[in-house]
Image: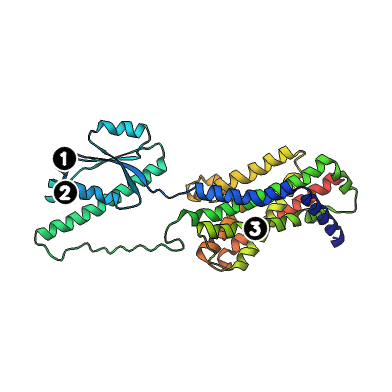
């Protein structure tokens, strides 16, 4: 492999990029745009649920019970109702997500220790939000019920009785349970893979469309030298894009890298090599930029979003889909990213993911060299 020939291909590619500033701007600006769009638009936090209350009892106890929902960031009181018939209309119009109905005799029954049935009606058109809302309602109701029970014991003269469970949860790695900490590593995987695969695929297919690929094939440049010369410039662009994404994530979303920057750089370089090789491989089966764009988008956007663990946990997927996910580099890079950025662990904690990324990079590069070699004969 000749360094001079690789340098010649690199110089040619750099000149091509410099003559097309729109493409360069796209490779640097689009990742930032995607990060801002996804980062601000996507949130897994279910907060500020619109709530309507129908209080038939209207006693101090019922008002205390309702206040438990309003003294948190999970519920926002939108309407105070007087008739139960209003609930269906508000749910149909989407004005509220949950309606709470407090029955008559609530305060009396609660004071006497009798069972009280409180109705919560939720909009189930969004199953995830409805399940979270019902869970919050149950938690608030259970907390109020426990405090009411303790007060009733105190009024009865039973002193010193308290619950024996001192529940103090401790959440590691993401104590505030912020969606940004969970989503940003996945966005980095999505953006880097899309930009790396798309840029190299379009670069080589562009040579085919312009007829210059035939000139390259009859030149002394070998397939491996062509791949290295074509991908190295985009490797540097990918590194700049990754640095920009990390800096923006820190400034706008407060997502810090808790682990080693060296580990992060090494894993990112391996991942980019694999993605660039994958892009070259796709270019060998594409004869037009339209086909290349469709293939690149189809094989990066959906798999990373759905099958990498970015949004949907693997345990909820069918076994055959879980098996397919093992073929995707995004699965391993995302696991390594979360280990470095959120947990701050060392290299040995994600060595298996690094090995899988190395295998992916080697396989895609080898297939690309073989296919380019066959097309050149």
**Is residue 283 in sight in this rendering?**
yes
Name the residue that disc number 3 marks. Answer: 357
In the rendered view, would you say 353 is above or below 313?
A: below
Badge count:
3
Spatial separation of the CA atoms under disc 2 and disc 1: 12 Å
Picture quadrant where residue 269 is located: bottom right
Among the two numbered marks 2 and 1 on one chain, the one whose residue lies closer to the N terminus: 2
Mark 2, mark 1: which one is toward the viewer? 2
- Percent of width and height locating residue 34: 59, 48
Q: Residue at x 78, y 46 (%)?
A: 204
Disc 1: which residue: 104
x then y, percent, for residue 343: 50, 64
Is residue 328 something one can see in this rendering?
Answer: no
Q: Residue at x 43, y 57 (%)?
A: 177
In the image, is 176 to the left or to the right of 329?
left
Kindly identify the residue that appears in the image at 26 percent across and 30 percent down.
85
Mark 2 vs mark 3: give the one in front.
Answer: 2
Label 3 crowd (10 A; few <14 / some 14-19 / many >=20): many
Residue 152's quadrant in the figure? Answer: bottom left
SS state under label 2:
helix
Q: CA distance from mark 2 to mark 3?
A: 62 Å
Q: CA distance from mark 1 to mark 3?
A: 63 Å
Task: Say if 176 sits above or below 69 in the image.
Answer: below
Please give the label number shown on residue 60.
Answer: 2
**Residue pictured at 51% horizontal, 44% vertical:** 318
Where's the N terminus, which quadrant?
bottom right
Q: Secondary structure at mark 1?
A: loop
């Amino acid at each position: 492999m000749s360094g001079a020939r690789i340098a010649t291909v690199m110089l040619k590619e750099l000149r091509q990029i410099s003559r097309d500033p729109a493409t360069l701007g796209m490779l640097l600006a689009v990742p930032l745009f995607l990060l801002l769009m996804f980062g601000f638009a996507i949130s897994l936090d279910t907060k500020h649920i619109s709530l309507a209350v129908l209080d038939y009892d209207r006693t101090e106890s019922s008002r205390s019970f309702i206040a438990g929902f309003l003294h948190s960031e999970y519920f926002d009181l939108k309407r105070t109702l007087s008739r139960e018939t209003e609930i269906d209309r508000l749910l149909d119009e989407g004005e509220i997500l949950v309606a709470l109905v407090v029955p008559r005799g609530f305060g009396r029954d609660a004071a006497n220790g009798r069972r009280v049935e409180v109705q919560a009606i939720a909009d189930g058109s969004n199953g995830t939000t409805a399940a979270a809302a019902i869970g919050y309602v149950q938690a608030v109701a259970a907390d109020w019920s426990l405090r009411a029970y303790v007060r009733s014991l105190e009024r009865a003269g039973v002193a010193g009785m308290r619950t024996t469970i001192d529940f103090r949860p401790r959440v590691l790695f993401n104590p505030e349970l912020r969606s940004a900490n969970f989503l940003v590593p996945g966005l980095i995987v999505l953006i880097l893979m899309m930009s790396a695969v798309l840029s190299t695929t379009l670069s080589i297919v562009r040579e085919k469309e312009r007829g210059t690929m035939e000139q390259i094939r009859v030149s002394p440049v070998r397939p491996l030298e062509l791949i290295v010369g074509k991908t190295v410039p985009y490797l540097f662009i990918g590194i700049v894009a990754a640095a920009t994404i990390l800096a923006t994530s820190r400034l706008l979303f407060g997502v810090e890298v808790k682990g080693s920057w060296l580990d992060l750089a090494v894993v990112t370089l391996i991942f980019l090599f694999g993605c660039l090789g994958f892009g070259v491989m796709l270019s060998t089966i594409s004869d037009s930029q339209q086909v290349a764009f469709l293939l690149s988008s189809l094989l990066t956007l959906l798999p990373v979003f759905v099958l990498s663990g970015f949004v949907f946990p693997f345990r909820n997927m069918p076994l055959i889909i879980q098996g397919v996910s093992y073929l995707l580099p995004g699965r391993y890079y995302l696991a390594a990213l979360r280990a470095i950025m959120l947990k701050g662990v060392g290299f040995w904690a994600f060595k298996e993911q690094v090995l899988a990324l190395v295998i992916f990079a080697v396989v895609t590069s080898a297939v690309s060299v073989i296919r380019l070699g066959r097309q050149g004969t």
